[in-house]
Image (cartoon, grey):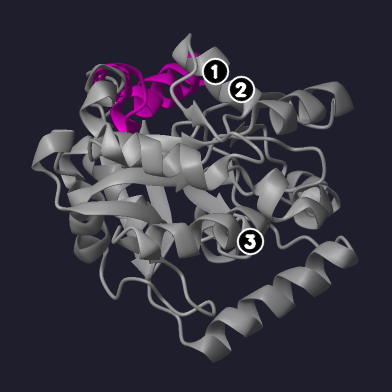
Amino acid sequence: MKITLIKHYDNSLLDEFKEDFNLNSNEVLDIHVYSYKLTKFQVQLSRYTYGILSKFNIKIPWSKKNHDIINFAMIFGPDFSKFLKSSIKSGSVSAYMMDAWPQYFDRIKTAIRYYDIETLFFSSKQVTEYFQKENIIKNAIRLPEAINPKKYVFKKLKDKNKDVISIGRKWKQYHARIIEPLIINNKSYKYEIDKTLMFEISSDLFKELSDSKVSICVPSIITHPLRSGDINTMTQRYLQSMASGCLVLGISPPEMIDLFGYDPVIQIEENNEAEQILNILNNIERYQDLVDKNYTTVLSSHTFQNRWTLIIEHFLKQCN
């Protein structure tokens, strides 16, 4: 069996995914990363071409589908245009989908029909259940988000020299209630300012997480409810924070509690936000046991190696 990983030039997460590829079976004969670097014009042309072809169901005559050759991609949102080139050659199409929000469901269904996709892996439990009930695809499989823990440096809370970090999406109401008390009490607080890039390179992010005691994480259903609809899912930020030894303060998606078997997050206390976070920081070492437990759970159950094992097992069953 040959798995061709398709990526755009800027998808560093796919490199993490590939590095944790699990070669447990001798039947996996080859893994090849097929990377094509596209200019902005080429990206738009590819998307436009796929949009026209799929809209009018104009199918390019694909090669005969070979289940021993799998064109596989990690997709954020509904961008299936990247399969156009590879699918002309041979093999089946499959993807590991994150950020599959309700507004994209119709486009995902179009791609399923257009490429005759038999298997999609979804990071969200609710999205997986939706496509299983729709009965539009043979295999809709849940595959929660994960990380490559080798990228992160775990530090004990007592060894960290920065206080609070909030990566990416901010919960504006919560942010407004803690920022001034943190400043007044001389606590450091790293957060996104006016949607500017927080870190130029991934290693800077990893270092900041490793140095920070508390990481604020809330699901997209709270920060972007119009986009997320009723989808409440665990994102990679939770796992990145835990792998770096941060105490996670925020709100747990229900599916995350199910995955961990316990609640790994210190829940935000509404109407007591400032006092709560200051009390945590002033007594941070009390939380080391929870931080250690979270770290152990991530290493055992939420790595890309874990996810690869499930992917390979599925594809081997398809081939047999």
Q: Let me know if residue 200 is in the magenta part.
A: no
Residue lying at the far right of the rendered structure:
56
| Tally of numbered tags | 3
Q: From which residue to which does the magenta span run? A: 291-320
Q: Counting residues from the N terminus, which is met first, the one under dot 2 or under dot 3?
A: 3
Q: Amino acid at mark 3?
A: Lys
- In this figure, which residue is indicated by the disc labeled 3? 172
Q: Estimate how packed mark 1 is, as few (under 14), some (14 to 19) or many (20 or more) residues with alpha carbons within 10 Å.
A: some
For the point 36% across and 30% down, the residue is 1
Crowd class of label 3 (few under 14; some 14 to 19; many from 20; radius 10 Å): few
Labelled pair 2, 1 in contact (Cβ < 8 Å): yes
Residue drawn at x 34%, y 43% as measured from the top left: 214
Tell me if I can see residue 219 in this picture: yes
Q: Residue at x 63, y 83 (%)?
A: 44
Q: Is residue 278 left or right of residue 22?
A: right
Q: Quadrant of residue 264?
A: top left
Of mark 1 and mark 3, the one earlier in the sequence is: 3
| Chief secondary structure of the magenta portion | helix
The label on residue 255 is: 2
Residue 247 point in image, percent of width and height: 33, 34
- Closest to the observer: 200 or 252? 252
Depth order, front residue of 161/283: 283
Name which residue type carries label 1: Ile
Question: Mark 2–mark 3 contact, CB under 8 Å?
Answer: no
Label 2, secondary structure: give it. Answer: helix
Measure how far apart labels 1 and 3 are at the Cα level. Answer: 24 Å
Q: Amino acid at mark 2?
A: Glu
Q: Which mark is residue 257?
A: 1
What whole-number distance in Å separates the C-alpha atoms at marks 2 and 3? 24 Å
